[in-house]
Image (cartoon, coloured by chain):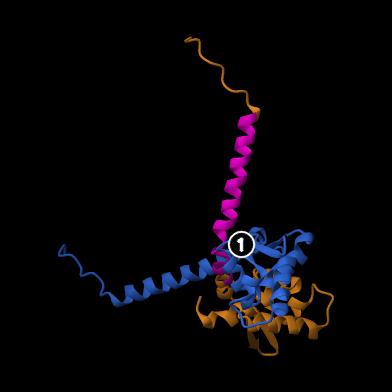
Chain colours: A blue, B orange
Amino acid sequence: MVELQTSQLDSIFHALGDATRRRMLRELAGGERTVGQLAEPFEISLAAASKHIKALENAGLIRREVRGRTHVCRLDPGPLASAHEWLSFYERFWTDRLDVLERLLREEDARKTPPPRGDDHD
Amino acid sequence: MVELQTSQLDSIFHALGDATRRRMLRELAGGERTVGQLAEPFEISLAAASKHIKALENAGLIRREVRGRTHVCRLDPGPLASAHEWLSFYERFWTDRLDVLERLLREEDARKTPPPRGDDHD
């Protein structure tokens, strides 16, 4: 992992560590939204919403564009891809665990099934 | 997304939002480590290391077992899988963006390549 990426990952994961911000991202998955539209579903002040939007912006997760008097936000998926990639390193651990579970269940089944009867050869 | 998972995801992403904690997880990918071993590579106090370990433990990312006088930590990949799954929802966005980039590059190539010469039919 490049040193440059460290502080970037810090801000990405930090931004994702809040349910309101995650819901804002999910909203932006549906398309562009104004700051007002993003704030609307939450019973929080516009100032509090702006703070959340700023955290998402700092992490590079959203881009804000000023159009006349409105600020329009859209999703930038790049940092989500970086976080996803970071986590992918650990994929073998949860896959391994599922493999072990499957093996144990198969062994359990084998124990429950009576052994096949001997043939009539002897 | 189930409501129950919300606070869990908060603590998982929060725990991941720190480079020291991410390096501790990477270390645990190599196998069990004592608290002392986990703290060693960082120039921080054992108290500070313990705080980081506590954050990882609260997020369910590591399990701590007391063996005699030592505390042994090991990775629990389950919460990493949850975070990975949450991010996977956005996979189509970065894949789409790569598709667009690829199309643009192909168009650029096509413009640079001279058009095929006409056959000698006419």
Q: Amino acid at mark 1?
A: Glu
Q: Position of residue A81 (x, y in %)?
A: 63, 59
- The secondary structure that dominates the magenta segment is helix
Q: Nearer the viewer, residue B120 or A32?
A: A32
Residue B86 lies within the magenta run: yes
Residue drawn at the location 57% of the way across and 47% of the way down: B99
Left or right of A68? Residue A94 is left
Left or right of A114? Residue B41 is right
Q: Position of residue B121 (x, y in %)?
A: 47, 10
Q: Quadrant of residue B17?
A: bottom right
> Going by the picture, which residue comes out furthest to the front?
A68
Element type at marker 1? Answer: loop
Residue drawn at the location 58% of the way across and 57% of the way down: B93
Please name the residue that numbered disc 1 is placed on: A32
Q: Quadrant of residue B21?
A: bottom right
Q: Nearer the viewer, residue A114 or A104?
A: A104
